[in-house]
Amino acid sequence: MTPTATKSEQDNGDRLLAGDIRALRKARGLTLAEIALKLSRSVGWVSQVERGLSVPSLGDLRAFASLFDVPISLFFSHDVPVEEERGVVVRAGSRRSLGTSESGLVEELLSPDLGGSFEMLRSVFAPGAELKTETRRPTEEAGYVASGTFEIEIDGVWHRLGEGDSFRFEGKPFRWRNPGAEPAVVIWVVSPPVY
């Protein structure tokens, strides 16, 4: 690979990282000034990061991950081998993983980036895994159970779903669990993106 090609790939990765950071800030309704204050950085630096003019260090990425409550792995693996596919196609072996098996939930980002009006995730819930405390997000969400048994409580009502079933809700409290002996795989769509 030529030095020019390597530089071009790095620039593309920096641009995707910048877009992800900007999308996360906007999804959480935060201003540049609020982010700068929380990170003890200048507004100018945060603005440069969001425009791809400054590249955050690993420590900075850890601070962004903590601030946005996302795994640091979200900021890596922007590799797309075919330039024409960048921002359009996500190959099965190139998905960004957003979780660990220890938590009982592993999610893979199916969307090429976080810059659109929604994100699509492949969520794998381990047998017995559950979200014990209900959560509420300012989002519209939908899911399709690809395999396994999945239970979701939406606004105080539990729903037991199996392969081929789907759901949708907006801005309501929810929690989930996998009561089965096999992993449950759910394709989840969230608007606006939260990762």
Image (spheres, rainbow, N blue to C red):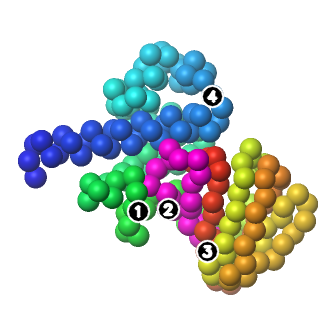
x and y percentages locating residue 119 in the rendered image:
57, 54
Cα distance in 3D space between marks 1 and 2: 6 Å
Q: In this view, does 60 lie above or below 65?
A: above
State the residue position of label 4: 30
CA separation in Å, label 3 and label 4: 32 Å
Residue 86: say if magenta.
no
Q: Which type of secondary structure does the marked residue at label 2 adopt?
A: loop
Residue 45 shown left or right of residue 147 in the figure: left
In this view, the residue in front, 12 or 73, is: 12
- Residue 123 percent across, percent down from the top left: 59, 66
Q: Residue at x 78, y 53 (%)?
A: 170
- N-terminal of the pair, mark 2 or mark 3, is 2
Direction from residue 93 to residue 160 in the image, left or right: right
Q: Give the range drawn in magenta.
A: 107-125
Q: Which of marks 1 and 2 is nearer the N terminus?
A: 1
Mark 3: which amino acid?
Answer: Val
Residue plotted at (90% across, 65% down): 157
Query: Is residue 181 visible in this depiction of the protein?
Result: yes
Query: Which residue was labeled with disc 1?
Result: 90
Task: Say which amino acid is labelled 1.
Answer: Val
User: Is the residue under label 2 in contact with that under label 1 (CB below 8 Å)?
Assistant: yes
Between the residue at mark 1 and the residue at mark 3, the CA separation in whole angstroms equals 18 Å
Task: Check residue 185 in the rendering and tell me which mark sits there, or answer none.
Answer: 3
In space, the residues marked 1 and 4 are separated at their CA atoms by 28 Å
Q: Can residue 38 be seen in this view?
A: no
Task: Label 4: state its secondary structure.
Answer: loop
Q: Name the residue under label 2.
A: 110
Sooner in the amino-acid sequence: mark 1 or mark 4: 4
Amino acid on which the number 2 mark rests in the picture:
Leu
Q: Which of 131 and 84 is in front in this view?
A: 84
Secondary structure, mark 1, is: loop
